[in-house]
């Protein structure tokens, strides 16, 4: 398994509490939940960029 990058994250306590509750609902750690949310956001962004590629049809 590839080594994971560590970094410090400053986060509003209310947002932390919301993410913590969400993580518990989905049986994940807070770290796992944040990583999951970031992964989904990046995949969504990549998908949006593909839709804007010249020569591709617009989705309605």
Image: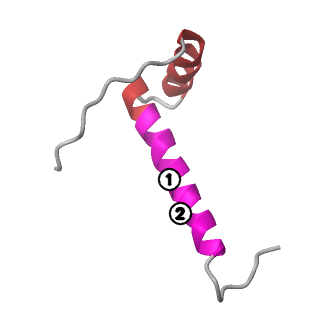
**Which scheme is used to colour this image of the protein?**
secondary structure
Query: Where 24 falls versus 51 (above or below)?
Result: above
Crowd class of label 1 (few under 14; some 14 to 19; many from 20; radius 10 Å): few
**Percent position of residue 12, x then y:** 54, 14
In the image, 52 versus 14, the foreground residue is 52
> Helix or strand or loop: what does disc 2 sit on?
helix
Magenta-drawn stretch, dominant element (helix, strand or loop): helix
Whether residue 32 is visible, yes or no, is: yes
**Percent position of residue 54, x then y:** 64, 84
Query: Where 57 falls versus 8 (above or below)?
Result: below
Residue farthest right in this picture: 60
**C-alpha distance separating marks 2 and 1:** 6 Å
- The structure residue drawn at horizontal position 49% and vertical position 18%, both measured from the top left corner, is 11
**Percent position of residue 37, x then y:** 51, 40
- The structure residue drawn at horizontal position 58% and vertical position 18%, both measured from the top left corner, is 15
**Percent position of residue 2, x then y:** 17, 50
Whether residue 29 is visible, yes or no, is: no
Residue farthest top in this picture: 13
Query: Where 17 falls versus 42 (above or below)?
Result: above
Q: Which mark is residue 42?
A: 1
Q: Quadrant of the C terminus?
A: bottom right
- Asked whether the beta carbons under mark 2 and mark 1 sit within 8 Å of each other, the answer is yes
In the image, 11 versus 37, the foreground residue is 11
Place residue 36 in its image quadrant: top left
**Residue 2 colored in magenta in the image:** no
Residue farthest bottom in this picture: 55
Mark 2 sits on what residue?
A: 46
Place residue 55 in its image quadrant: bottom right
Q: Which residues are magenta?
A: 34-52
């Amino acid at each position: 398994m590839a080594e994971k990058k560590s970094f410090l994250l400053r986060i509003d306590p209310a947002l932390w509490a919301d993410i913590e509750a969400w993580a518990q609902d989905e049986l994940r750690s807070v770290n796992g939940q944040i990583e999951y949310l970031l992964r989904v956001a990046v995949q969504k962004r990549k998908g949006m960029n593909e839709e804007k590629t010249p020569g591709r049809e617009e989705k309605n």
